Image (cartoon, rainbow, N blue to C red):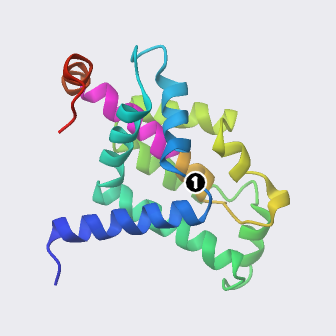
C-alpha cells in the first residue's frame, strides 16, 4: 500500500494527465490566477502562479473533488451514465448546480478570497474557461470548467494566505 505522500503524488499526476488530455495546461490555469491577482500581488508571474496551483493540486480534498468531476465528464462523454443523468450532463442542464457546488467546495478550502474569486471567474468565463464551456466542440466539460475556475481561485487564496512565502519569492526568486 502506498504511503499518503505517494498517494498524493499519484493523484496529482493523474489529475495533471487528465487536465492535459482534456485540453487544460498549467499555463492556462496560471493565466487565470494572474488575471485575478494582478491588482493584489504585484509582480505575480507564471512561475509563482503555477507553484500556487501545484499546492492546491496536492491537497487531498481538492484532489478528490477534481478527480470526481473529471471522471463524471469522461463517463458522460462516453455515454456511460444512466438516464436521466446522461441527458443532464449532455445538455449541461442549467439547474443542475452540482458542478458549481463541487467547485465551491474546492475553492472554500482556501477561504472567502477563493470563493469570491471562483464566482467572479465563473461568471466571466475568462481564458480557458470560455473554451471549456463551448458546447459546439462535442466535449462534455460540465464539471471541468467549474473545477478549473475553482483551482485558479483556490490558488489565489493560497497566495493570499501565504504572504510571507510570496514576499520571500520576490526577494530571492526561490520557491521551496
Outermost residue toward the right in this view: 136
Q: Residue at x 85, y 58 (%)?
A: 136
Which residue is located at x 81 percent, y 57 percent? 135
Asked if 53 appears above or below 98 in the picture, the reply is above
Viewer-nearest residue: 57 or 51: 51
Percent position of residue 34, x then y:
49, 27
Q: Choose top left, top right, bottom left or bottom right for residue 23.
A: bottom right
Tell me which corner region of the image, top left, top right, bottom left or bottom right, holds residue 137: bottom right
In terms of image quadrants, where is residue 46?
Answer: top left
Q: Secondary structure at mark 1?
A: loop
For residue 65, above or below residue 157: below
Point out the image quarter for the N terminus: bottom left
Q: Is the magenta region chiefly helix, strand or loop? A: helix
Disc 1 marks which residue?
Answer: 24
Magenta stretch bounds: 150-162
Disc 1 crowd, CA 10 A, few/some/many (<14, 14-19, 20+): many
Residue 71, magenta (yes or no): no
Amino acid at each position: 500500500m502506498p504511503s499518503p505522500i505517494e498517494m498524493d503524488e499519484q493523484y496529482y499526476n493523474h489529475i495533471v494527465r487528465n487536465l492535459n488530455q482534456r485540453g487544460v495546461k498549467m499555463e492556462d490555469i496560471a493565466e487565470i490566477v494572474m488575471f485575478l491577482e494582478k491588482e493584489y500581488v504585484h509582480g505575480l508571474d507564471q512561475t509563482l502562479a503555477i507553484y500556487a496551483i501545484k499546492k492546491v493540486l496536492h491537497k487531498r480534498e481538492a484532489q478528490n473533488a477534481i478527480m470526481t468531476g473529471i471522471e463524471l465528464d469522461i463517463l458522460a462523454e462516453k455515454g456511460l451514465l444512466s438516464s436521466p443523468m446522461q441527458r443532464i450532463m449532455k445538455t449541461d442542464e442549467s439547474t443542475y448546480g452540482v458542478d458549481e457546488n463541487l467547485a465551491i467546495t474546492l475553492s472554500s478550502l482556501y477561504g472567502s478570497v477563493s470563493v469570491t474569486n471562483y464566482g467572479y471567474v465563473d461568471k466571466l468565463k475568462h481564458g480557458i474557461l470560455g473554451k471549456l464551456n463551448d458546447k459546439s466542440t462535442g466535449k462534455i466539460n460540465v464539471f471541468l470548467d467549474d473545477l478549473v475556475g475553482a483551482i485558479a481561485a483556490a490558488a489565489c487564496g493560497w497566495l493570499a494566505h501565504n504572504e510571507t512565502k510570496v514576499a520571500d519569492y520576490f526577494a530571492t526568486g526561490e520557491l521551496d
